[in-house]
Image: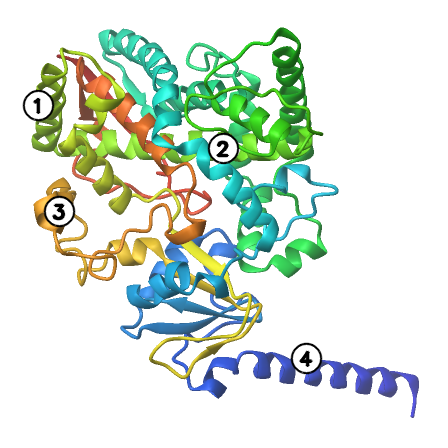
Amino acid sequence: MSLPLFVAAVLATVLATAFLYIQYAYSFWKRLGVPFQKPSFPFGNFAASFLSKKSLGEDLRVIYESTTEPVIGMYTIFKPTLLIRDPKLIQHILVKDFQHFINRGFHTNTDVDPLGDNILMQDGDKWRNARTKMSPTFTSGKLKSMFETVVKCGKTLENYLDRLAVSQKEIEVRDVFARFATNAIASIAFGIEIDCLENPDHDFRKYGKKFFDPTLKNILRFNIGILSPTISKLFGLRFADKDIGEFMTETVRKNLKYREESGVVRKDLFQLLMQLRNTGNVQEDGDWSTKTNRDKQMSVEEMTAHAYLIFIGGFESSSTTMSFCAYELARNPEVQQKAYEDIVDTLAKHDGQLTYESLNDMKYLEQCIEETLRVHPPFEAGGRQCTKDYTLPDTNIVIKKGMTVMYSVIGLHYDPKYYTDPTKFIPERHDKAEIAGKNFVEMPKLAFGDGPRNCLGLRLGKMQVKIAIVMLLQTLKFELADQHVGKELKMNPRSSVRAAVSGINLKLKKR
């Protein structure tokens, strides 16, 4: 056989083998008799999100709405993945049968990417140990101790926006709220006082923003990290860029040295991380001491990883919720007025003082926050990795170890089966009388996940959101900018968190 014919024969064999492999890979769900969404080469069912035409959450929502089946098979590149639509099955995976789905399935190499060694990315016993130790950092007592720190940052925000309201300019509030939240969480998580409202180019804002900026690199890191951890591992994709890690580690190192040498005790999360580092545990409420005779239980790098996760989670999800809440209040002035009256009436019952207790008594405000999280969840999708074979209840579907299962947060939150008029902003649907007797299956809420791997800092995040809205509504009214009047917000398909393409622009009017 001549060389050209030999090469042609080899090439034909390779192509035929590749074709047969692809056909076989994409027949997985059909062979099991499971309903599935037809995939396309080479991205499976996620071409739109890989090509930045849709967000991952929107891609999943389309699949969610394509069927009424409790589950539907799909493919992330060639890997079979299962979308769980039924809240009852989701509850089994996240809560009741959690021992089968302990991991999120993300890849991280902590040797080269120490910021990835945090409770979001960790698996198995390492995650379980870290979660057990970190959980006491967010008790009611601890949050109450941090309350005044957030209020102080809120006063800075109030003064800043009061000045802008006088100028009657339209304001892009998402960036403003992100700068406020950066101030608050930098103080709480790192013990550092900054002012990103007046100095938007501060390093904390720069490195926090860099993590979430919808750049091609970040889009690939986010999508591949979730949809194909194997490829993420192959290309050595990091949780965060090296310069972010270096800045954060140096910040922690300097602050740690200062507190240990000066003996300064500050009631914040950094102090609690110091307790973890020195004693291996977070002490009871009221005990902020870090003294011990034991060896260090946590390295500076581990401490930084946890602090950074609290930081990025604390400013991004909070500022996203603040901005969408302000948008919905501007869009629904009758709701805004009712929220304002709730704030005024509640403060009057507490001698005009904004305290941890008075904030928690603002029931209608709480309903507004809950409805914002339903309509605009910061993260529109979630998932878990199976850690040991599992048969879905009431089915013959066996989820094998290593397989990923996903759920569509936005799909469930907008499903009329669970929420009447789901596109409408109706805070009253979260009133205690309205939800009495309803459980997760009848009214799924997944903005912060559920079960042992839900968002650890959700109460801190809500506290930040409430404080900001309360302090602003007392003196200001939110109104839609002209560009938003009569129009729906268009979401940015390149963003890893829910975000409007053109931002959220509002007019602020003095009361």
Q: Amino acid at mark 2?
A: Ile
Q: Nearer the viewer, residue 445 or 331?
A: 445
Q: Amino acid at mark 3?
A: Arg
Q: Nearer the viewer, residue 463 or 125?
A: 125
Which residue extends farthest bottom? 1
In terms of secondary structure, where does tag 4 sit?
A: helix
Mark sitting earlier along the chain (3/1)? 1
Residue 107 point in image, percent of width and height: 63, 53
Disc 4: CA contacts within 10 A as few (<14), some (14-19) or many (>=20): few
Tell me the residue that label 4 is attached to.
Answer: 18
Q: CA distance from mark 3 to mark 4?
A: 52 Å
Picture colour scheme: rainbow
Q: Nearer the viewer, residue 458 or 482?
A: 458
Mark sitting earlier along the chain (3/4)? 4
Disc 3: CA contacts within 10 A as few (<14), some (14-19) or many (>=20): some
Q: Nearer the viewer, mark 2 or mark 4?
A: 2
Q: Amino acid at mark 4?
A: Ala
Tell me the residue that label 2 is attached to.
Answer: 310
Residue 121 point in image, percent of width and height: 57, 47
Q: Is residue 213 visible?
A: no
Q: Quadrant of residue 325?
A: top left
Q: CA distance from mark 3 to mark 2?
A: 30 Å
Tell me the residue that label 1 is attached to.
Answer: 341
Q: Nearer the viewer, mark 3 or mark 4?
A: 3
Q: Is residue 257 above or below residue 368?
A: above
Disc 2: CA contacts within 10 A as few (<14), some (14-19) or many (>=20): many
Identified at 40% across, 75% down, the residue is 392
In terms of secondary structure, where does tag 2 sit?
A: helix
Q: Quadrant of residue 275?
A: top right
